[in-house]
Structures are given as C-alpha cells and as structure tokens.
C-alpha cells in the first residue's frame, strides 16, 4: 500500500509540477518499494493515454449561434417572468373578488349542511396555507442558491 | 460583436455589462464560450447538454452580473455557476452513467483523421472506449479535477483556486481518478 505522501509525489511528478527535491524523494521511495514502482508504471500509462485524447469539436455553426442563443434565452426568461407576475396579479385579484361572493353564496345556501360549508372554508384555508408554504420554500431556496456561486 | 469589444480588457467589459450593455456581455460570452462548452462537456459528457448548460450558465451570469467583481477573473466566477448547474443536472436526471456511456464519441484521439497504421487506430479506439467508460464511473468531483488537469491543462494551484479546495485535495482526487482509469486500461 502506497503512502499518502508517495501518492502526492507521483501526481506532482506525473504532471510536471514537482521540485527537484520532490523528484529525488519519489526516486528514493520507489527504489525501496516495488509497489510504488508498479503504481508509477500504471499512472504513466494512464497519463500517456489521456495525453492523446481531446474533446471533439462541435460543428462551426455552434459558435456562430452561441451568443444569440444565450441572448434569446435571457430575453425569453424575462418574458416568462413578466407573464408569471401579471398572471399572479390577475389570479390574486380574481380570488380576492370571487372569494367573498362564493362565501356569501355557500353560507346563504341553506340546502347545504353546515358541516359541508365549514369543510369548504377549511379546505380554502388549507389551500392558502399550501400556496404560501410552497412560495416561502421557493423564496428561501432562491435566496440560498443566489449566493451559492459567490466566492467570498 | 465588434472587433473593438473583442480587444477590450475584461474588467471594462464587466463594468459595461453591469450597466446593462448586452454587447459587452456578448463579448465576454464570445471570449469564453469554448472553454465553457468544453468544461460542461467534461462534466456531463453529452454535447447537447453541454451546449445547453453552458448557455444557461451564461444567461444566469447575465442576470447575476451585479455580483461580478471586475477585479477578478470573469471565467472563474462564471465557472462556479456552470459547475453547480452541471452537478445539479447530473444529480436531478440520475442518468449520469447512461449519458456518459451513450457519449463515447465525446473523447477522440488527437491523431484521428490523419492517415495512420490501422492496428494503431484500433488500439487507440479501444483505449478511448475504455477511458470514456472509466470516466463515467468516476465521482463527479474526481472527474471534474481530472478534466481540469488533463483537458484544460490547468496547474494544481489554478484548479484549487477555481474549485476553492486545498491543493492536497486536488492531488488526492487526481490520484483516485487515475487509479480508476488505470484499472480500466488493464482490464482484459
């Protein structure tokens, strides 16, 4: 089993980020340990293999359209945000105006048992709590996510 | 994007972008779109997803542009957004292995396309296939460090700075990733 130090030395020498002292230290360790020599041989094969690999180039038009796609994406996100906000305002206004009328209707309708009327109100309150809870969770997540990428 | 924008210092482009100048931000995007795409490709292993995620990261970067410090490198800041998006993508989709397996052509040999010994080509293709498969089995963070080292050719110090981790962690992740790749290359 190679030691942590031997592992670090193998990586630094393999990646040519070593000092002359580190190279000597690794050579000394390798001279004493067949395991290190064997592992070093494995890593040099990997290094050689990865050195010959490269990312395939995408089609040239990918780069021509790249910025336009980013711009369109940002613009569309903004458009969706506007639609969402206006939709929420409209839905809020509608609920605000329709709810009292509904409540009046339910409570005036004597054919409905009192238990049903109360259950409908309770269901309405449950719905409001649910919406507020989801909204609060989304807002909290958004606030945390917003700062996640910031290097302090 | 004008040639003037292309030659403008990064800090000046950031300041202009922060005032809402989309041309300036476009110049930043054009400057970094290639490393962004290839970084994402290294993380998610699929060309289409890499393109989508790198563009989405730029769109988010534009929305969060007021947080950019013009005195610091733009790409390092952008990369934090990109890697978070890529890791979330891998976590959410739970299709990491499948996608990486499907994306075997995401690695190609540098010599591909040039006339060479058919036996050598076959051997390189086999090596590529094994490497691509082994990379799919690495943890996200090990693969990320390997990609930054081998494909983006960053120094340990640069990787440590970009990922905000100690240099020792960079080396231990590299060791772990390479040990896995070595096993894959030795498989019968």
Image: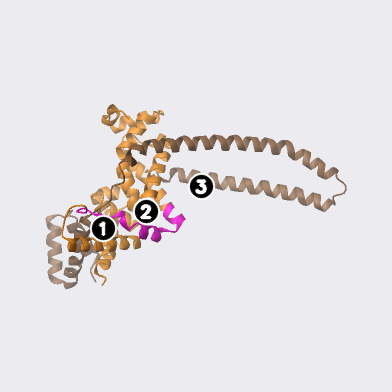
Chain colours: A brown, B orange
Give the label, 2 or 1, closer to the camera: 2
Q: Are marks 2 and 3 in contact (CB under 8 Å)?
A: no
Element class at badge 1 = helix
Left or right of B22: which side holds A21?
left
Residue at 34%, 50% in the rendered image = B41
Residue at 40%, 53% in the rendered image = B87
Left or right of A140: which side holds A46?
left
Element class at badge 3 = helix
Separation (CA) of disc 2 from disc 3: 24 Å
The residue nearer to you, when weighing B22 against A126, is B22
Q: Chain of mark 2?
A: B
B117 versus A87 height, above or below:
below
The residue that mark 1 highlights is: B171
Instruction: Using the rendered image of the protein, determine whether residue B121 is visible from the camera's viewpoint.
Output: yes
Prevailing secondary structure of the magenta residues: helix
Q: Chain of mark 3?
A: A
Residue at 40%, 60% in the rendered image = B98
| Residue A141, numbered circle | 3
**Residue B91: which quarter of the image?**
bottom left
The residue that mark 2 highlights is: B44
Left or right of A112: which side holds A48?
left
């Amino acid at each position: 089993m190679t030691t942590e130090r031997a592992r670090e030395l193998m990586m630094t020498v393999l990646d040519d980020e070593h000092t002359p002292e580190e190279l000597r230290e690794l050579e000394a360790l390798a001279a004493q340990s067949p395991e290190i020599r064997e592992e070093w041989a494995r890593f040099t094969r990997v290094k050689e293999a990865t050195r010959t690999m490269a990312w395939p180039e995408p089609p040239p038009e990918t780069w021509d359209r790249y910025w336009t796609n980013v711009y369109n994406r940002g613009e569309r996100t903004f458009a969706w945000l506007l639609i969402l906000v206006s939709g929420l305002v409209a839905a809020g206004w509608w609920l605000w105006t329709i709810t009292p009328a509904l409540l009046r209707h339910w409570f005036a309708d004597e054919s409905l048992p009192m238990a049903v009327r109360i259950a409908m109100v309770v269901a309405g309150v449950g719905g409001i709590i649910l919406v507020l809870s989801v909204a609060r969770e989304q807002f909290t997540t958004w606030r945390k996510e917003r700062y996640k990428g910031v290097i302090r | 994007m004008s040639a003037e924008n292309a030659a403008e210092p990064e800090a000046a482009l950031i300041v202009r972008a922060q005032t809402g100048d989309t041309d300036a931000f476009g110049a930043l995007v054009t400057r970094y779109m290639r490393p962004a795409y290839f970084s994402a490709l290294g993380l998610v292993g699929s060309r289409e997803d890499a393109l989508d995620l790198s563009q989405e990261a730029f769109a988010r970067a534009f929305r969060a542009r007021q947080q950019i410090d013009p005195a610091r490198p733009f790409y390092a800041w952008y990369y934090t957004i990109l890697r978070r998006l890529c890791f979330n993508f891998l976590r959410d989709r739970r299709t990491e292995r499948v996608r990486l397996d499907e994306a075997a052509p995401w690695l190609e040999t540098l010599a591909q396309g040039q006339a060479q010994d058919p036996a050598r080509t076959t051997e390189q293709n086999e090596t590529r296939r094994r490497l691509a498969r082994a990379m799919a089995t690495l943890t996200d963070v090990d693969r990320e460090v390997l990609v930054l080292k081998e494909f983006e050719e960053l120094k340990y110090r640069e990787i440590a700075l970009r990922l905000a981790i100690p240099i020792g962690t960079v080396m231990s992740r590299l060791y772990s990733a390479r040990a896995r790749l070595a096993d894959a290359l030795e498989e019968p």
